[in-house]
Image (tube, grey):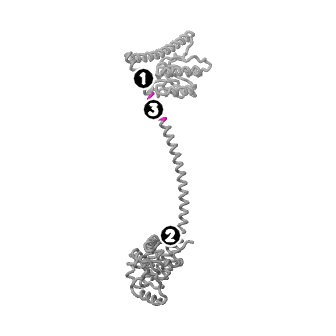
C-alpha cells in the first residue's frame, strides 16, 4: 500500500548523528523532568513575535511539512551531506527525515535553513499579519494557489499560529491531499483513455499512410502512362511534320521542274468547266430539237388547238376546272412573282412557286412538285438540274407540265389556257410536255 505524508512517523533513526561541532555523537533527548519547562518555553515563544522552528512544531506537523514543503531530491541531498548515508527508498527517506526533524540537530537545522530560503516570499508576506484571524484568512487565500507549500510553512511557523489554527490548517491539508489523490487517480484514468485514443489515432494514421502510399503509387503509374502517351504523340507529331516537310520538298521540286504547272492546272479546271457547259448546251439543244419535231408532227396531222398555238390576250376568268388545282410555277424573275400569282389566282387556281434553284433549295423542289397538280416551267430562268428534275418527275407521275421559254405574264397566260383546256377534256391523251415559246 502506498504511504502518504500523514502516516504515523517511523521509529527514531539510529542515534549516530553529527552534532554542531561535526563529531558523531548520540541524539540529544529531552529530559522528562524538563517537560514542563519546555512547554513553558513554547508557550512563551507563541506569545512573542519569534517564528517557531521546525523542531518546535507539533509532531503531527512534521510529516506534511517535510513531505510537501521540501522536495525528495533536496531532502536526500541534505541527508547525504549531514548523515552517514540516506535510504534508497523514498518512503524510508521520508520517514527518517520526519523522525530526525522532531529534535534539534544538524539535519533539522539544515532543513530549517532550506525551507526558509525556499519559501522566503511567503514568509515576508506574513510579517504584517498580527492576529490569528488574519493569518487564517491569508491561508484561505493561498491554500488553493500554486504556492500552497510555502504558505503552509509560513503559517505553521508563524508566532500567531495557535493550536486550534494549526489543527485546522493540518486538517485542510490532509483533506486536500485526499483530493490530490483522487485527482491523481482521475488523471491516471484519463491518461489511460488518452493512451487508448492515441493508439487508435496511430492505427488510423497507419491506415491513412497506407492509403496515401497506394494513392502515390497509382499517381506515379498514371504519370508514367501519361508521359509515355505524351512521348508517343510527340513521335506522331514529329513524323507528320517530317511527312509535311517531305511533301513540301517534293512540291517545290515539282514546281521547279515544271514552272508552268500552276498555269496548266488552271487551264485544266477551265477545260472541265467548259466541258460541263458544253454538255448543258447539248442537252438544251436536244430538248429544243425534240420539241420542234413534236410540233411538226402535230401540224402535219392537222391537230388544231395545240397548247403552244393558243395565244389568248387575257387569262381565263376563273376557269371552273382550275378551282381545285394547285399550279406550280418553276423559275421566272423574282420581281415578277406577284404578277405570276395574280395571273394564276385570277384563273381560280392555287399558286405555288419555286425559283428553280437560284435562291430556294433545290432539294425542296421535289416536295413542291409532289404538292402541285399542274406545272409550268419557265426554262429560261431555271438551272439545268431543276429542269431535269421537273421533266423527270412529270414523266414518272404523268403530271401535266408546260414548258415556257420566255418568262412573261403573256406566256404564263397562254400556258394556263392550255392547261385549262387539258383539264376540261379529260379524255384527251396526255402528250409529252410541249414547248411553248414566250
Residue 151 shows up from this direction: no
Mark closer to the observer (1, 3): 3
Mark 2–mark 3 distance (CA, rounded to whole Å): 80 Å
Q: Residue furthest right?
A: 427
Q: Position of residue 317 (x, y in %)?
A: 53, 25
Range covered by the magenta-colored residues = 228-239
Quadrant hosting residue 129: bottom left
Mark 2–mark 1 distance (CA, rounded to whole Å): 97 Å
Q: Position of residue 78 (x, y in %)?
A: 43, 73
Mark closer to the observer (2, 3): 2
65 falls in the magenta region? no
The crowding category of the residue bearing disc 1, from other C-alpha atoms within 10 Å (few below 14, some 14 to 19, many at least 20), is few
Q: Taken as a whole, is the magenta stretch helix, strand or loop?
A: helix
Q: Quadrant of the N terminus?
A: bottom right
Residue annotated with mark 2: 88
Q: Secondary structure at mark 3?
A: helix
Q: Is 118 or 93 nearer to us in this picture?
A: 93
The crowding category of the residue bearing disc 3, from other C-alpha atoms within 10 Å (few below 14, some 14 to 19, many at least 20), is few
At a point 48% along the width and 83% down the height, the residue shown is 58
Quadrant hosting residue 106: bottom left
Mark closer to the observer (2, 1): 2
Residue annotated with mark 3: 234
Is 375 above or below relative to 24? Answer: above
Q: Position of residue 272 (x, y in %)?
A: 45, 17
Amino acid at each position: 500500500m502506498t504511504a502518504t505524508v500523514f502516516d504515523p512517523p517511523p521509529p527514531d533513526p539510529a542515534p549516530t548523528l553529527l552534532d554542531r561541532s561535526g563529531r558523531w555523537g548520540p541524539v540529544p533527548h529531552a529530559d522528562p523532568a524538563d517537560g514542563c519547562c519546555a512547554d513553558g518555553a513554547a508557550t512563551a515563544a507563541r506569545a512573542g513575535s519569534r517564528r517557531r522552528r521546525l523542531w518546535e512544531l507539533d509532531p503531527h506537523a512534521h510529516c506534511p511539512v517535510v513531505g510537501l514543503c521540501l522536495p525528495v531530491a533536496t531532502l536526500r541531498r541534505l541527508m547525504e551531506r549531514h548523515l552517514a548515508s540516506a535510504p534508497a527508498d523514498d518512503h524510508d527517506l521520508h520517514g527518517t527525515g520526519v523522525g530526525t526533524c522532531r529534535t534539534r540537530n544538524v539535519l533539522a537545522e539544515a532543513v530549517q535553513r532550506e525551507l526558509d530560503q525556499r519559501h522566503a516570499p511567503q514568509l515576508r508576506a506574513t510579517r504584517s499579519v498580527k492576529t490569528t484571524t488574519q493569518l487564517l484568512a491569508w491561508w484561505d487565500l493561498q491554500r488553493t494557489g500554486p504556492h500552497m507549500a510555502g504558505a503552509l510553512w509560513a503559517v505553521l511557523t508563524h508566532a500567531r499560529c495557535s493550536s486550534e489554527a494549526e489543527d485546522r490548517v493540518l486538517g485542510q491539508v490532509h483533506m486536500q491531499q485526499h483530493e490530490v489523490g483522487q485527482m491523481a487517480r482521475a488523471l491516471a484514468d484519463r491518461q489511460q483513455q488518452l493512451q487508448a485514443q492515441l493508439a487508435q489515432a496511430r492505427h488510423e494514421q497507419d491506415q491513412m499512410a497506407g492509403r496515401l502510399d497506394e494513392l502515390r503509387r497509382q499517381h506515379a503509374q498514371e504519370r508514367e502512362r501519361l508521359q509515355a502517351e505524351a512521348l508517343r504523340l510527340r513521335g506522331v507529331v514529329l513524323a507528320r511534320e517530317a511527312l509535311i516537310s517531305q511533301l513540301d520538298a517534293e512540291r517545290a521540286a515539282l514546281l521547279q521542274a515544271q514552272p508552268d504547272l500552276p498555269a496548266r492546272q488552271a487551264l485544266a479546271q477551265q477545260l472541265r468547266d467548259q466541258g460541263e457547259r458544253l454538255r448543258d448546251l447539248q442537252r438544251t439543244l436536244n430538248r429544243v430539237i425534240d420539241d420542234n419535231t413534236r410540233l411538226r408532227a402535230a401540224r402535219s396531222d392537222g391537230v388544231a388547238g395545240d397548247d403552244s398555238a393558243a395565244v389568248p390576250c387575257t387569262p381565263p376568268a376563273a376557269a371552273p376546272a382550275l378551282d381545285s388545282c394547285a399550279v406550280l410555277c418553276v423559275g421566272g424573275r423574282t420581281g415578277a412573282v406577284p404578277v405570276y400569282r395574280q395571273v394564276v389566282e385570277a384563273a381560280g387556281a392555287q399558286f405555288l412557286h419555286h425559283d428553280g434553284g437560284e435562291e430556294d433549295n433545290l432539294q425542296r423542289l421535289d416536295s413542291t412538285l409532289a404538292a402541285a397538280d399542274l406545272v409550268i416551267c419557265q426554262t429560261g430562268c431555271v438551272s439545268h438540274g431543276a429542269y431535269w428534275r421537273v421533266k423527270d418527275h412529270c414523266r414518272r407521275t404523268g403530271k401535266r407540265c408546260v414548258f415556257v421559254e420566255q418568262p412573261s405574264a403573256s406566256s404564263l397566260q397562254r400556258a394556263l389556257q392550255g392547261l385549262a383546256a387539258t383539264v376540261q377534256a379529260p379524255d384527251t391523251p396526255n402528250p409529252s410536255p410541249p414547248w411553248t415559246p414566250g
